[in-house]
Amino acid sequence: MSAAPSWECGDVISLDPPTSPCTPVRVRARDGARLVACAHGGQVLGWSPASDERDRLWLSPLARCGAGEAIRGGVPVVFPQFAGRGPLPKHGLARDRAWELDTGSDGADVARVACRLQDDERTRAIWPHRFTLTLVAEASGTQLSVTLAVRNDAASGGDAFTFTAALHAYLATAVPLADVVGLAGLPAEDNAAGGAVRVLPAGPLPARGPVDLAVRGTRGPAVVRTGGDEVEVHCEGDDGFDSLVVWNPGEPHGLADVPPEGAAQFVCVEPAALTPVTLAPHATWRATAVLTALVPRP
């Protein structure tokens, strides 16, 4: 276990090879949009749009990074199991181990980070399949685009495998009140009530916890509103993510890597593939989530 380094979107830009999987890498686009990422978990840790300096992702000041640890905040990758919906460790095996990481050129039109994870003996001891995960994050203007690709690397004549996945985005909130709009009238599984299905009421959805709702069959857009700040989340394509999950643990949260009252600082809106995806040998599945900072009109 190791303490987290400073991971906010600062002015320092570094493309030097990371000294460890937990070393943050910062990349900036020509227009000023910025990304922070690290190889551990193949994880985006911070994102500032070109329009302002504020980081729109939340990262816990108590976040832990190291083998077997999941970094609390940013955009963790959930694969091949969402939450505890199956026999594997919660949220699968991708977020608590080192990936390979590559970056684009600093000052290019788009700030770009690419990460890759392949199976090995340790992953196959948990989930006995051969795979490659690729994550590509790109930021420019007011948008962050994150694409997750899953490839089945089984040999010819091998087996298909089935998985679920998500991008567990932690959106920073600067004020105690926050809500989500765009989901009214949709059916949602209330994970805090054993998965009971209820139709979300008209109007904004309060996003302060405890709330744990899996809204099936929607790709958004959903907009997180926190005072004057708004971030829109939507999923591209018709065969990628099929749901949005809204989560906040509320207080007291009982999470060792979140400060007391820290749950008031974020709302998770997670593009997810909750309907199991079956992938044949040599096939690839892709899903893209887009976050847009909605800048108020002057």
Image (tube, rainbow, N blue to C red):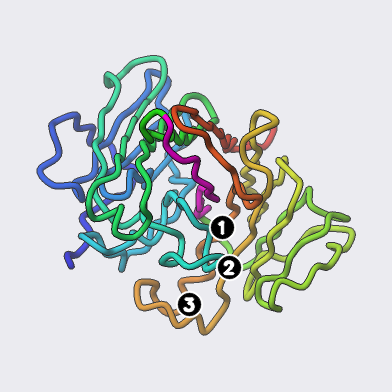
Residue 281: x and y, percent?
46, 32
Q: Nearer the viewer, residue 277 or 169?
A: 277
- Residue 62, located in which quarter of the rendered image? bottom left
Task: Please say whether residue 24 is one of the residues in the magenta stretch.
Answer: no
Distance from Cα at disc 2 to Cα at disc 3 = 12 Å
Q: Earlier in the sequence, mark 1 or mark 2?
A: 2
Distance from Cα at disc 1 to Cα at disc 3 = 16 Å
| Residue type, numbered disc 1 | Cys
Residue 199: x and y, percent?
86, 63
- Crowding around mark 2 (Cα neighbors within 10 Å: few <14, some 14 to 19, many 20+) is many
| 168 relative to 154, above or below | below
The kind of secondary structure element at disc 3 is loop
Residue 174: x and y, percent?
53, 58
Q: Earlier in the sequence, mark 2 or mark 3?
A: 2
Q: Circle 2 sits on which residue?
A: 248
Q: Which residues are magenta?
A: 157-171
Residue 261: x and y, percent?
48, 77
